[in-house]
């Protein structure tokens, strides 16, 4: 059974020029994305994974035809040597999975595809706590998709939770430790967490962050480093950064994500993390 | 005629067969057949099936046409809508009330349901064969019982079949003995006494008075039973025929040297192939009925933390169970986990990997997975090598540490449908109830969240404590494939809750008159107790041999153990596709169908037998015949009114089971409500006139010497020992996991009623026309609260005192507490009926929507409004209340049509030398807006007058329940 945050590999993908104009966003027009800056932030993110944490990082080139392709997280769910290739809720993003599937297959993972045409699932809605899965039923993920996920990862309980007011479940709720859930303080986020607690046999601590978006952080458990947390910078979310600062025995890595955040991208969105030494 | 009687008995027997746990109520039926006709019945029963069967069928058909009071279900379906309207055309206009009174919601659902119903019935007609075989079994069973009448201990029979043959040979002489099941019955009583000695004794007295002097002392008989163990071995035991389940479980555990046995249980397959847990507290025979005495030894309660088990041997058996669960697919896991668990099992069984000994393919000989691939075997072998040095016990422990983390570990799955008819699975586990759609967990209710678990027929309900998200209590209902499934699920819930959540088992609910439904409680040790006890285990670790999993896999392919396997697979496959489920359900349905058919047959026959009895009865029969589209069930009682009501109640479930479809269910639900009302009346009267009443009760019946249909006897007995009979009512039961049973009782009731009408189109009125006043107007559906009875009683008194006239203020009802201010009852205006002298009208608004009862989104609960209006003649009051007189005879006739169910109860009492006959009619009319209920009422009154011109109408009670519109639903 996979523990939370135990990863050896990461899969990332470059940012296409088309992102600025073509990437999907929830809230209308927002400010424009500075692609160059986005690429620089992304470079630092990948560097942290590869250099600081020593993960084996596979980087796929961007595909101009797929403006959202940098958000690889949505394309697959990997756990325990099995990769479930998602069927993204946004039709424009379905093409993203092809390259992901190939590379994951090449990396030796067992590939399971979603053949059901009625199912949709974005990896961003899948929260794996190390003990179980939560699937956010959102604009992008439907129940059928969740059912398929449940059938693929048989060892684990797969519970559904409703998500509203955010793009994905992980937009405001991620793991920040083995039994620690980082959660935004919005009503919606808190309600979702309560719902998750009711659905679960396991108990979790919660790390409540003033900003929902800051609750999207990346937790890793690296043998040589212990608890590691990639989180948004103090410049972006000063209050939340203070909360992260209270975590004891953590290697905290602030990562800037101002540009991709404009197109609803979080820190988790930009990588698929998995452990290949199963 | 005898044939008919015979078939009646068979019907009853069949019903037993399909309601495994109803034994206490129905089994002793035959016992009181202390009359010649009963003997004949038995003889008839024992005739070769080939002759009996055709006769029965003939009988069935002919009675339909002859009596023409009971139409076949399908024809009633077709005819009734028009027939109903036709009836209303004849109604006098004088009773027309404002439309609001009779307004009913129509929904499309109803029609859909009807369709299904019709289909179902078709299939019912196609099942005579099944019925035949069932009854055959029952006959055989009956004979066995007869044989048990010699007191010497018989040496064990080696084969069941041999035994049966002996029975057949002995048959002729034995038919002289009056009471086929006497022995059996006494055992029942003993068991009852344990639970409720008072009631048991009452019954016994009565029983003793009927005992035949010819009765030969019985011998104790042994049954050969087989137990299939988890390692694939098979044990055979000679078990005393009337032994309780615990005896057998103890024997098994003793044999395998298992001390921590509270986690384990025995399962058996019922006639429909469903797996049931053998209740240790009950007789084995009663539970398995006519099925073979074949059991599987299984883990019943999966300890969440197996490392806390005291002995390795216990862990070993848990491992075996889990391996079986995995192989059968009941415990799904990933490839990786399969491999890991397989390797642990391998280590435990074979020890360290040895390259010389363990040649290529050695894993293949063992089965670890439902579909074991080469790849998996290689992985298992690879991991096996890493376990070097682990002792078998350590390997088992490691196996368990991994297995216990699987999400489906210890989850007992049950197929169900949610309120929208979507196939789901309900999983019962140590922590609570899990709801799955496919394998996706869509909801979870931890035990502390659940206030009440109940079932009613095939519906299963949980009442949820208000939480952080939902602020109100809510009740969620699920539809199980059939009532047995609902009951099974309910029992499993009760057991799991008790075992894992409580420190000690809950007391079996006290016997109250009003307790409805099953009294089942888990009576074994709880986990806390078993842990406590196992700490004291002080013995050297027992030696046991780890059997090869090869053997296990073989046994899984074999017949009996293979059964389990299949079920597991079935469950698994139905997770993925609903086909398997469908098949299963269908099987259930089929089994049920034939009960109906035969039951109906018996009902049709009954009136004929009693033709020469009471004049009133004849009248009634005539009357019934005149209502050509009514189905009818006819029962008579031996002793008194109350039992009649009971039998009425008890026979209903049988009918209900048969109506697989919701439309019928609607109807039956209403019937039941009406009946519950009756119960209340009974209780109240008992409170009022306790001495006289009990006298009546104990007195042996005078007039009833002729024919006592078994069904009825069951009912009677059930009344006498009221709690026990109900204790296994298949219909419904509830359980309060919080053990705060008294809490919110009223609300519970309201809610219950509300739930009853879930998905119900509309339900209208119960009309009572009583010829001899019954003291009390009954307003509520009751669950089990005595206080409420008292209130009811007061209510009744108040009514008498106030003598209110027609247009009444609801508050005058005297039962203010039940009036919901939010939904004031409509004032009923009507012209004074020319026929009925009306002295008093009461309206009580009972089940008005309690705001806190709003269901969650998951289950749209249709709320209903209930109203009871009493029209009562002045004359009767006061005289009949306190002195019920001596009951001479009583009978109940129930007839049903599409939108109307009529229960007629005739009671003859002798009071101070004056004989008094009271006829009480209870008519339940179901229908849509287009039915004029006032007309229906008028018609009913008119008919009553016509039928009994020499009698007077003393009371009319209208009990109206209307579905509220959407807005009430929030």
Image: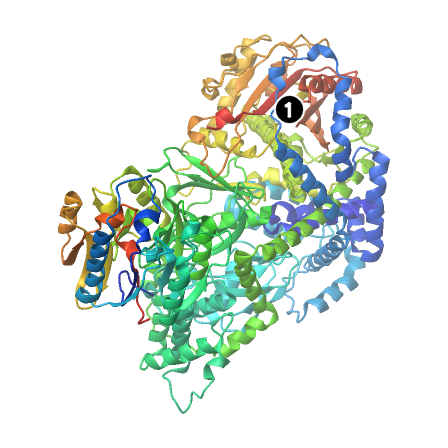
Q: Can residue A108 be seen in this snapshot?
A: no
SS category of the residue bearing label 1: strand
Pinpoint residue B439: horizontal percent, then vertical percent: 46, 55
Name the residue: 52% across, 28% down: B863
Q: Identify the coloring.
A: rainbow
- Residue B65 occupies which quadrant of the picture? top right
Disc 1 crowd, CA 10 A, few/some/many (<14, 14-19, 20+) = many
- Drawn side of residue B631 relative to residue A166, left or right: right
Q: Residue furthest bottom?
A: B356
Q: Nearer the viewer, residue B497 or B92?
A: B92
Q: Nearer the viewer, residue B765 or B859?
A: B859
Name the residue: 63% across, 23% down: B765
Q: Can residue B49 be seen in this snapshot?
A: yes
Pinpoint residue B729: horizontal percent, then vertical percent: 58, 43
Q: Nearer the viewer, residue B837 or B214?
A: B837
Q: Quadrant of the C terminus of chain A?
A: bottom left
| Number of numbered discs overlaid on the protein picture | 1
- Drawn side of residue B503 relative to residue B167, left or right: left
- Vertical position of residue B856 compared to residue A104: above or below: above
Pointer 1 residue: B766
Pinpoint residue B254: horizontal percent, then vertical percent: 46, 69
- Drawn side of residue B281 relative to residue B357, left or right: right
- Residue B602 occupies which quadrant of the picture? top right
- Residue B217 occupies which quadrant of the picture? bottom right
Q: Quadrant of the N terminus of chain A?
A: bottom left
Q: Nearer the viewer, residue B45 or B888?
A: B45
- Vertical position of residue B368 compared to residue B423: above or below: below
- Vertical position of residue A233 compared to residue B871: above or below: below
Pinpoint residue B681: horizontal percent, then vertical percent: 58, 26
Subunit of mark 1? B
């Amino acid at each position: 059974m996979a523990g939370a945050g135990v990863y050896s590999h990461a899969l990332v993908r470059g940012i296409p020029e088309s992102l600025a104009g073509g990437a999907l966003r929830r809230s209308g027009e927002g400010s424009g994305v500075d692609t160059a800056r986005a690429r620089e932030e992304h470079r630092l993110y990948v560097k942290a994974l590869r250099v600081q944490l020593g993960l084996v990082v596979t980087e796929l080139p961007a595909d101009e035809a797929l403006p959202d392709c940098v958000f690889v997280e949505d394309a697959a769910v990997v756990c325990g040597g099995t990769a479930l290739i998602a069927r993204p809720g946004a039709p424009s993003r379905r093409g993203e999975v092809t390259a992901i599937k190939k590379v994951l297959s090449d990396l030796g993972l067992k590939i399971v595809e979603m053949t059901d045409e009625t199912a949709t699932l974005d990896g961003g809605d899948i929260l794996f706590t190390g003990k179980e899965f939560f699937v956010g039923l959102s604009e992008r993920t439907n129940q059928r998709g969740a059912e398929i996920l449940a059938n693929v990862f048989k060892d684990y309980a797969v519970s559904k939770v409703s998500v509203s007011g955010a793009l994905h479940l992980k937009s405001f709720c991620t793991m920040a430790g083995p039994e620690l859930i980082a959660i935004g303080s919005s009503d919606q986020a808190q309600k979702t967490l309560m719902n998750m607690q009711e659905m679960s046999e396991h108990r979790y601590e919660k790390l409540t962050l003033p900003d929902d978006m800051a609750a999207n952080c990346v937790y890793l458990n690296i043998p040589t480093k212990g608890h590691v947390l990639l989180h948004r910078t103090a410049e972006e979310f000063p209050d939340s950064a203070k909360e992260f600062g209270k975590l004891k025995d953590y290697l905290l890595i602030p990562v800037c994500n101002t540009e991709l955040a404009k197109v609803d991208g979080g820190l988790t969105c930009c990588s698929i993390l998995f452990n290949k030494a199963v | 005629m005898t044939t008919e009687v015979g078939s009646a008995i068979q019907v009853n027997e069949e019903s037993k067969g399909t309601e495994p746990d109803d034994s206490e109520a129905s089994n002793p039926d035959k016992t009181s057949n202390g009359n010649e006709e009963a003997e004949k019945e038995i003889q008839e029963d024992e005739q070769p099936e080939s002759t009996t069967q055709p006769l029965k069928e003939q009988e069935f058909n002919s009675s339909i046409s002859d009596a023409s009071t009971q139409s076949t279900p399908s024809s009633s379906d077709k005819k009734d809508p028009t027939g109903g309207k036709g009836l209303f055309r004849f109604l006098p206009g004088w009773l027309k009330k404002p439309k609001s009174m009779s307004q009913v919601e129509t929904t499309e659902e109803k029609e859909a349901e009807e369709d299904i119903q019709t289909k179902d019935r078709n299939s019912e007609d196609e099942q005579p064969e099944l019925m035949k075989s069932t009854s055959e079994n029952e006959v055989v069973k009956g004979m066995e019982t007869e044989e048990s009448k010699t007191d010497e201990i018989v040496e064990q029979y080696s084969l069941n079949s041999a035994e049966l043959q002996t029975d057949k040979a002995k048959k002729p002489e034995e038919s002289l003995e009056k009471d086929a099941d006497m022995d059996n019955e006494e055992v029942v009583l003993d068991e009852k006494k344990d639970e409720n000695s008072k009631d048991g004794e009452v019954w016994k007295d009565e029983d003793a008075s009927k005992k035949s002097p010819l009765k030969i002392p019985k011998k104790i008989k042994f049954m050969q039973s087989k137990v299939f163990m988890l390692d694939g071995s098979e044990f055979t035991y000679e078990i005393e025929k009337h032994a309780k389940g615990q005896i057998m479980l103890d024997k098994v555990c003793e044999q395998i040297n298992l001390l921590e046995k509270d986690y384990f249980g025995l399962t058996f397959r019922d006639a429909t192939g469903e797996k049931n847990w053998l209740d240790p507290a009950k007789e084995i025979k009663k539970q398995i009925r006519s099925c073979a005495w074949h059991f599987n030894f299984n883990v019943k309660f999966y300890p969440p933390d197996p490392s806390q088990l005291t002995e390795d041997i216990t862990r070993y058996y848990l491992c075996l169970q889990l391996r079986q669960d995995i192989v059968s697919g009941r415990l799904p896991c990933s490839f990786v986990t399969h491999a890991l668990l397989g390797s642990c099992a391998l280590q435990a069984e074979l020890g360290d990997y040895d390259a010389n000994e363990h040649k290529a393919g050695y894993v293949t000989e063992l089965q670890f997975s439902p579909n074991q691939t080469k790849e998996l075997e290689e992985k298992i072998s690879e991991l096996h090598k890493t376990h070097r040095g682990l002792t078998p016990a350590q390997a088992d422990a490691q196996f368990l540490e991994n297995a216990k983390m699987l999400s489906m570990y210890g989850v007992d799955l049950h197929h169900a449908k949610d309120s929208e008819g979507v196939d789901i699975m309900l999983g019962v586990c140590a922590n609570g109830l899990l709801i799955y759609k496919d394998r996706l967990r869509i909801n979870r209710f931890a035990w502390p969240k659940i206030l009440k678990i109940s079932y009613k027929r095939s519906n299963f309900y949980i009442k949820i404590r208000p939480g952080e998200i939902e602020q109100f209590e809510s009740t969620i209902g699920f539809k199980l494939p059939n009532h047995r499934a609902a009951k099974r699920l309910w029992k499993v819930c009760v057991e799991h809750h008790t075992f894992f959540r409580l420190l000690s088992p809950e007391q079996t609910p006290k016997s109250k008159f009003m307790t409805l439904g099953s009294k089942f409680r888990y009576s074994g040790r709880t986990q806390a107790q078993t842990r406590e006890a196992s700490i004291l285990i002080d013995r050297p670790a027992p030696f046991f041999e780890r059997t090869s999993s090869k053997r296990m896999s073989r046994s899984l392919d074999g017949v009996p153990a293979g059964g389990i396997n299949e079920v597991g697979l079935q469950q698994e496959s139905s997770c993925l596709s609903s086909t398997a489920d469908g098949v299963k359900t269908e099987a259930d349905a089929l089994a049920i169908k034939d009960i109906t058919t035969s039951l109906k047959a018996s009902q049709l026959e009954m009136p004929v037998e009693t033709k020469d009895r009471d004049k009133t009865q004849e009248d009634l029969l005539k009357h019934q015949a005149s209502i050509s589209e009514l189905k009818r069930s006819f029962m008579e009682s031996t002793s008194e009114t109350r039992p009649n009501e009971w039998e009425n109640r008890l026979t209903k479930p049988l009918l209900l089971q048969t109506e697989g479809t919701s439309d019928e269910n609607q109807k039956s639900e209403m019937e039941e409500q009406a009946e519950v009302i009756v119960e209340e009346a009974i209780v109240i009267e008992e409170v009022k006139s306790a001495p006289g009443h009990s006298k009546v009760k104990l007195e042996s019946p005078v007039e009833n010497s002729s024919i006592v249909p078994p069904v009825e006897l069951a009912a009677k007995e059930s009344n006498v020992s009221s709690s026990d009979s109900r204790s296994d009512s298949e219909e419904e039961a509830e359980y309060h996991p919080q053990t705060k049973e008294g809490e919110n009782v009223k609300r519970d009731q309201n809610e219950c009623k509300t739930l009853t009408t879930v998905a119900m189109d509309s339900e209208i009125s119960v009309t009572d026309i009583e010829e001899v006043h019954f003291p009390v107007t009954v307003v509520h559906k009751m669950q089990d609260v005595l206080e409420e009875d008292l209130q009811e009683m007061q209510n009744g008194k108040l009514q008498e005192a106030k003598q209110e006239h027609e247009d009444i203020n609801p508050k005058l009802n005297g039962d203010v507490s039940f009036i919901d201010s939010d939904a004031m009852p409509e004032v009923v205006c009507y012209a004074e009926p020319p026929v009925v002298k009306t002295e008093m009208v009461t309206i009580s608004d009972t089940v008005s929507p309690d705001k806190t009862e709003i269901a969650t989104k998951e289950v749209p609960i249709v709320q209903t409004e209930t109203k009871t209006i009493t029209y009562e003649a002045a004359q009767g009051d006061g005289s009949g209340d306190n002195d019920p007189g001596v009951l001479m005879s009583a009978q109940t006739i129930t007839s049903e049509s599409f939108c109307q169910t009529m229960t007629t109860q005739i009671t003859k009492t002798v009071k101070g030398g004056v004989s008094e006959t009271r006829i009480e009619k209870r008519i339940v009319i179901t229908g849509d807006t287009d039915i004029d209920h006032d007309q229906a009422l008028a018609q009913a009154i008119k008919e009553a007058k016509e039928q009994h011109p020499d009698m007077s109408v003393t009371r009319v009670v209208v009990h109206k329940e209307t579905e509220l519109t959407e807005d009430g639903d929030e």
